[in-house]
Amino acid sequence: MQYEKTNNNPLLKYLSKEQLTELAEVERKETYKNGEHIIRFGARDRDVFVIKKGAVGIWIESGGNEVEVAQTGEGNITGEVNFIIPVRRSASLRAINRITVLRYPYLEMIQLLKNQPEIAARIFAAINDSIAAKNLKTIRGLSEKIKSVPNK
């Protein structure tokens, strides 16, 4: 099914005004200072976040050290894979500057989605869009790197 975008929240972009009102009870607005963790590598939480203002660094563990591998900013969803698949967090997320995020706590979201299958379908469509866009960006980046490797 194809949904129409109704607002600028990438997680809730397909929800009607009435459905947005129901989600407002679950949504938590939080602020973080430069360097503060939003998500920690290895954590088991499953909350999903929307970056409302500012930027975050994405850090992975490599050889016992944390290495920043990417940055993302306003209007992006993060944590959506853990929302779907119960695995440990694969990266840390830290504020690059003062940021504002919208947190959607897993347990509260799941309770609401169990009772509201139409909202669930629309949110999972938005999550699918986010994951597909990230995969496409990664593939394009790898393709560019491969093209720049000299032939021997």
Image (spheres, helix red, strand yellow):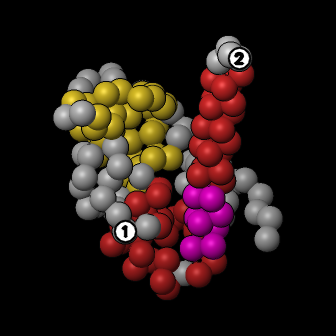
Question: Image quarter for residue 128?
Answer: bottom right
Where residue 84 appears, x then y in whole percent? 47, 67
Point 55% across, 54% down: residue: 11
Task: Give the residue at the far left of this rendering.
Answer: 64
Amino acid under disc 1: Pro
Point 67% across, 60% down: residue: 14
In magenta, the rendered stretch is: 120-128
Point 60% across, 43% down: residue: 134
Mark 2 residue element: loop
Where residue 20 appears, x then y in whole percent? 55, 62
- In the rendered view, would you say 140 is above or below 44? above
Is disc 1 surrounded by few (<14), some (14 to 19) or many (20+) residues within 10 Å? Answer: few
Q: Which residue is mark 1?
A: 86
Q: Nearer the viewer, residue 33 or 86?
A: 86
Q: Are marks 1 and 2 in contact (CB under 8 Å)?
A: no
- In the rendered view, would you say 120 is above or below 123? below
- Is residue 129 at least partly visible in the picture? yes
Question: Image quarter for residue 118?
Answer: bottom right
Q: Which residue is mark 2?
A: 151
Where residue 88 appears, x then y in whole percent? 30, 59
Compare marks 1 and 2 and give the one earlier in the sequence: 1
